[in-house]
Image (spheres, helix red, strand yellow):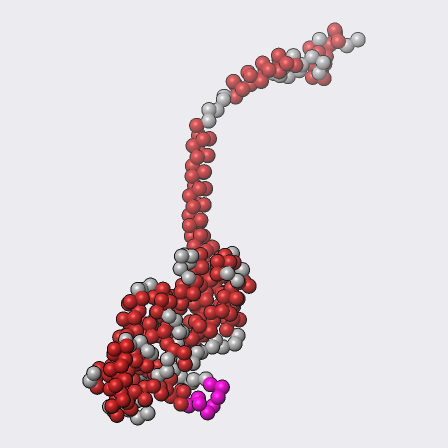
Amino acid sequence: MNHNKVRKYLLIYLDGDLDDNKCSQMEAHIAKCASCRREYERLQHVYKGPQHCRRESAPPFLWTRVNTRLKSLQRERRQGELKTVLPILQPLMTATLLIAAVFCGYFLGNTPVHSDLQQANVAEEVMQQTFDIDVFDPNPPQSLGRAIMMIYERPDEVLP
Amino acid sequence: MQERELIKKLRSGDEQAYKRLFDFYADRIYNICVRFLNSRQEAEDAVQDIFCKIYFSIDRFREDARLTSWIYRISVNHCLNAQRQKRRARFFSLDWLSEGEMTLKSARSDDPQDSLEKKETESIIQAAINGLSEKQRTALVLFRYEGLTYQEIAEVLNISVAAVESRLFQAKQELCKKLLPLLKDF
């Protein structure tokens, strides 16, 4: 193994990821080459395997910040949902009202209207048959109007 | 709590279940975000976005996959998108003219003695990782910083295990090439 190859594989050798054959070649080279050994020692000093790495730990109060952020995001999402629904709902409601108004107009326009005379005849017939009353008689019998009329028309018969 | 039960409760909007999910995944997601975005402030914002995404899209989760893989996938995709947006914004704001490579700012450490060296080595590695292609970087971050197995990375990225191996192999070669010149003065 030459110097370049040894230097290329130094970290892999340090992590113990080289196969046995290459590993023994590396060991042999490092044992006899002073400059490669120096490089190896420097690297070994600086680069330690994963088990030696300092882990960063989360700062205190991070949970409070995460929780606050989450709550505000939930609020924003709810408002956002309303904001997205409103622009759809508004034209929908307007269209519904417009359609209802057109339908009402069409329905009213197509409804047949009875004439006054027809209505009056029907009413007269019903009253006559049911209550024996002539609704078009202005002074029906037993009424005050008929009594007054009798006095005017035939006073000799009515008045003593 | 069983995964299925948790998913069921999440779908019904159970806040306790959501809090449990947060407690379990917050550190992992934050870790990924920091590695991808190189900024703790941006990572915090990203974590919030990711958890909101999880909450609103849990109904779309297909139960033939693992919840962990699904959450990792959402996180990785979110970070990659955020990174692309950031790169685009930086390009149009012409910040790239004045800035060098992005490195992780202000590393936190409880022990001040080892913090300086750790900070330095981490920023060197981070700078080299940032120079990798998107595919290689994603695989390497999940492997190195999240400690995922090849199988898990394959599930997250929806690729075969062989493809993960290949990506990681190339990523490590490329990383080695980038790291060695940076370590000359170390």
Above or below for A5 versus B21: below
* Residue at 45% over, 52% down: A86
> In front: B32, or A33?
A33
Q: Which residues are magenta?
A: B109-116
> In front: B138, or A21?
A21
* Residue at 33% over, 63% down: B158
The residue positioned farthest toward the right in the image shown: A160
Choose top left, top right, bottom left or bottom right for residue B128: bottom left
The answer to whether any part of residue A155 appears in the image is: yes
> In front: A156, or A26?
A26
* Residue at 41% over, 87% down: B118
State whether the magenta stretch is mostly helix, strand or loop. Answer: helix
Residue B40 position in % (x across, y down):
43, 78
**Residue A95 forms part of the magenta stretch:** no
Residue B135 position in % (x across, y down):
30, 71
> In front: A95, or A53?
A53
Above or below for B27 versus B99: above
* Residue at 29% over, 91% down: A38
Choose top left, top right, bottom left or bottom right for residue B159: bottom left
**Residue B115 forms part of the magenta stretch:** yes
**Number of numbered discs:** 0
The answer to whether any part of residue B176 appears in the image is: no
The residue positioned farthest toward the top in the image shown: A157
Q: Is residue A16 left or right of residue B24?
A: left
Q: Is residue B3 left or right of residue A27?
A: right
Choose top left, top right, bottom left or bottom right for residue B47: bottom left
Q: Is residue B143 left or right of residue A140?
A: left
Residue A61 position in % (x across, y down):
53, 74
Quadrant of the rendering where the C terminus of chain B is positioned? bottom left
Residue B182 position in % (x across, y down):
29, 88
